[in-house]
Amino acid sequence: MLFNDISGATHLLTLEALVVLEHMGTTATSETALAAVLREHFDVEDATLSDDVADLLGQLSSLDLIEPCPL
């Protein structure tokens, strides 16, 4: 569970989403780097990892927990 101080909303997130958010912190992070983090922490399918990361980032963005920024 994650409480967003800015919006006042509480979100029920997967462990993968929490690990990604923790890794990102306040720093811009590439999808490749996030894939590597997920690979370190979880048993993931390499064949779909790129799509899974993009989907996860889309979900986090739709919850206003992250925003796109150029690297």
Image: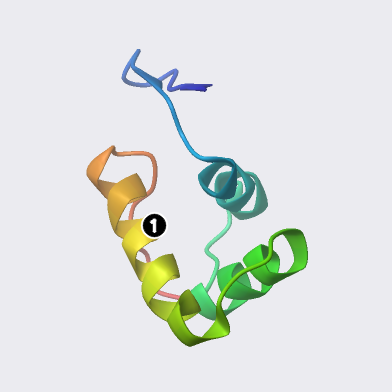
Residue 70 picture quarter = bottom left
Q: Position of residue 53 (x, y in %)?
A: 44, 67
Residue located at (55% from left, 67% from top): 29
Residue tagged 1: 56
Q: Is residue 47 above or below residue 36?
A: below
User: Furthest residue to the right?
Assistant: 40
Residue located at (56% from left, 46% from top): 21
Left or right: 46 as drawn, with respect to 50 = right
Residue 58 picture quarter = bottom left
Circle 1 packing at 10 Å, graded few (<14), some (14-19), many (20+), is some
Secondary structure type for disc 1:
helix
Left or right: 43 as drawn, with respect to 40 = left
Left or right: 12 as drawn, with respect to 19 = left
Residue located at (39% from left, 57% from top): 56
User: Furthest residue to the top?
Assistant: 8
Q: Position of residue 71 (x, y in %)?
A: 47, 76
Q: Label 1 sits on what residue type? A: Leu
